[in-house]
Amino acid sequence: MKFYIAEKNIGPGATREDVDELIRRLRDRGWEVAYGERANEVTDPAEAADQQAVMDRFADDFMACLSEMEK
């Protein structure tokens, strides 16, 4: 899947630099992520059947990266 992230996904006071750092961290973990306010896209037909599980794994990594950035 391809995920899109913008400032509003991080929280109040987030900057473009924060988003860029989060995107970099998520890409380092193997996720396909871009800046923007779009719906996430299924890029691999194999993911379509298990879309919720993929989104759950992404959410876990998203929160872990945010936690790392706060330190």
Image (tube, rainbow, N blue to C red):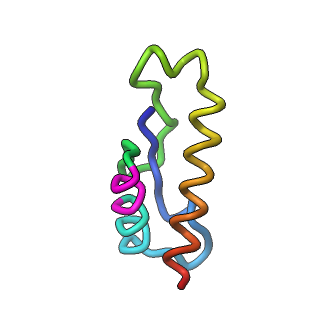
Q: Which residues are magenta?
A: 24-29
Residue ID at (54%, 55%):
61
Majority SS type along the magenta span: helix
Where is residue 65? Give x, y as percent. 51, 65
User: Which quadrant does the N terminus fall into?
Assistant: top left
Position of 17 compared to 65: left or right?
left
Where is residue 17? Give x, y as percent. 36, 74
Residue ID at (64%, 41%):
56
| Number of numbered callouts drawn | 0
Q: Determine whether 10 is above or below 5 in the image.
A: below
Residue ID at (37%, 46%):
30
Residue ID at (61%, 69%):
11
Looking at this view, is 10 or 29 the one in front? 29
Where is residue 39? Give x, y as percent. 51, 36
Q: Is residue 61 magenta?
A: no
Q: Determine whether 60 is above or below 57 in the image.
A: below
Position of 53 compared to 47: left or right?
right
Position of 39 compared to 26: left or right?
right
Where is residue 34? Give x, y as percent. 36, 48
Residue that sits furthest to the front in the current view: 29
Q: Determine whether 42 is above or below 49 in the image.
A: below
